[in-house]
Amino acid sequence: MLKKIRVTISVLLFSLITLYFLDFSGFLPESFSVLTDIQFIPALLALNIIILIALVALTVIFGRVYCSSICPMGIYQDIVAWFSKKILKKKRYTYSKAKIVLRWSVLGATIIAFLFGFTFLVGLLDPYGAYGRLVTHIFRPAYLAGNNFLEAIFSSFNNYSFYKVGIYSLGVSSIIIALITLLVIGFLAWKNGRTYCNTICPVGTTLGFLSRFSLFKIQFIDDKCNMCGLCSMKCKASCIDAKNKVIDHNRCVTCFNCIEVCHRDAMKYALIGSKKKKAVETAPAFSYIREDKPKDESKRRFLSATLITSIAAGQLLAQTVTEPLLPKRELKRKTPIAPPGALNFDHFREKCISCHLCVSKCPSHVIKPAFLEYGLGGVMQPKLYFDHGFCNYDCTVCCDVCPTDALVKLSQEEKHHTQMGRVNFIIENCIVYYDETSCGACSEHCPTQAVRMVPYKGALTIPEIEPEICVGCGGCEYVCPAIPYKAIYVEGLTAHNTIEIKQEEVEEVTIDEFGF
């Protein structure tokens, strides 16, 4: 019964979290963002004290139910392990000793990397962020292709329930990292179940430490157990030593497989009594797990250090554009454009775990993963790129869905006064200049009139820019017809500014005018 309850909850949460990443039509209400807020690392980075207390309390009372039923990467491993058991009928798990040194070394390295601004490692190992990238870069393109296939079929029968959506590449490096993550974690789950959770995952190590003190634990009933070993064979965490009747609760993810398979009712999930707890602590096999004294000190350092606001130190990839203006000059942006709500690069790099929920949810498809634009520590963190669209003046979706507060929530009014970048104009690339052709597309698409047309030659007008009132939305850059080198583009800012715009200077712009 306990396993059925766990499986039901796990499948429900896993399906909803996956669908939340895949949903491109706004089918799911905004309230579903709570599915991402309850993840451990996002709650820790956002300093969501209520969620953190709830997760810690849940672990201390019931054990690692977070790893078992809430973490999407944990459930992904269970799905892979389930398929492996279906295909390999004779597959059996075996008890193995805890990789204590490896587990705490990875956790320590993650903390040190975070404190020194190398947040790439935090995002790479965080199970929620890793799963988000799997969905965004691997599952979502397949999902969109399926939608377009159905659209073609239904449209042929004059049924327009589906509409066609664009499928764009989001960056080779992020796709490769997502694919490697999928294959490596999938392989480990296929071979040995929850290996990733109990050897590499920093969340698993942290919650595993807390689960040692949980009130409810799976335990043996000595007078009923005949040491047949079935429980150990079914334990995907490899934490049951059936010969000595000992369970390593650091690694147990409370999946209840052992209880279900036991034919003698020799295992139970119940409140730990003082007598039973003492017996487990004095068992020879368990003494190995508890003999590592420095673990307590490491944990205390982790809990204190990860709550300190750290200054991220990353080196931006410098790209010089200081040469004299030349005809048909290629655009080379020196500074990336961080999404609205990023505040500044230090805040953004410190908080962002590259889960790519903002990438998946952006209705204009302008948020893409960076490579080295933010420095080595900012690999995979989102940036704005205006090849397929621009940042809608009224849109705050990315701020609303960010679970770590890397992108702080902005109202529409605050978004209107947030300067993410500044417009730049290369006159030699402008078709008005070199082709003497009338244009003005950039001015028409500027919501603040930071770009306006002024008299040039005869009846011709040419763009004139006022960077001080530019919000960096990229509308001008996106619509500029100068190909292959844009005549107008947005240069990013390392710190977003708040600007004042006179109301009469703002043109009312609608989505329909942009062709979306």
Image: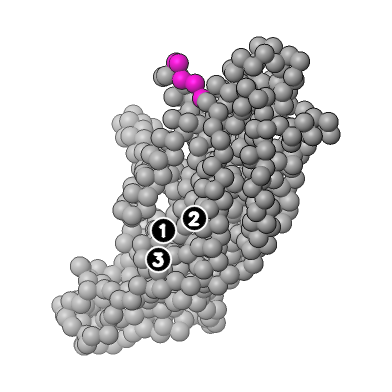
Considering the image in quadrants, where does the C terminus appear?
bottom left
Q: Is mark 3 on a helix, strand or loop?
A: helix
Work out how far the residue at label 1 is from the one at label 2, CA to CA, in angstroms. Answer: 9 Å
| Residue receiving disc 1 | 380
**In this figure, what is the number of numbered marks?**
3
Q: Give the range drawn in magenta.
A: 89-93
Tag 1–tag 3 contact (CB < 8 Å): no
Magenta stretch prevailing secondary structure: loop
- Residue 211 lies within the magenta run: no
Residue plotted at (65% across, 60% down): 301
Considering only order in the chain, which callout, 3 or 2, is on the residue closer to the N terminus? 2
Q: What residue type is labelled 3?
A: Leu
- Name, please, the residue furthest toward the top: 263
Classed neighbour count for the residue bearing mark 3: other residues with Cα under 10 Å, few (<14), some (14–19), many (≥20): some
Give percent across and percent down for residue 280. Answer: 74, 32
Which is nearer the eye, 381 or 315? 315
- Per the rendering, the mark at residue 161 is none
Considering the image in quadrants, where does the N terminus appear?
top right
Give percent across and percent down for residue 278. Answer: 79, 34
| Residue receiving disc 2 | 123
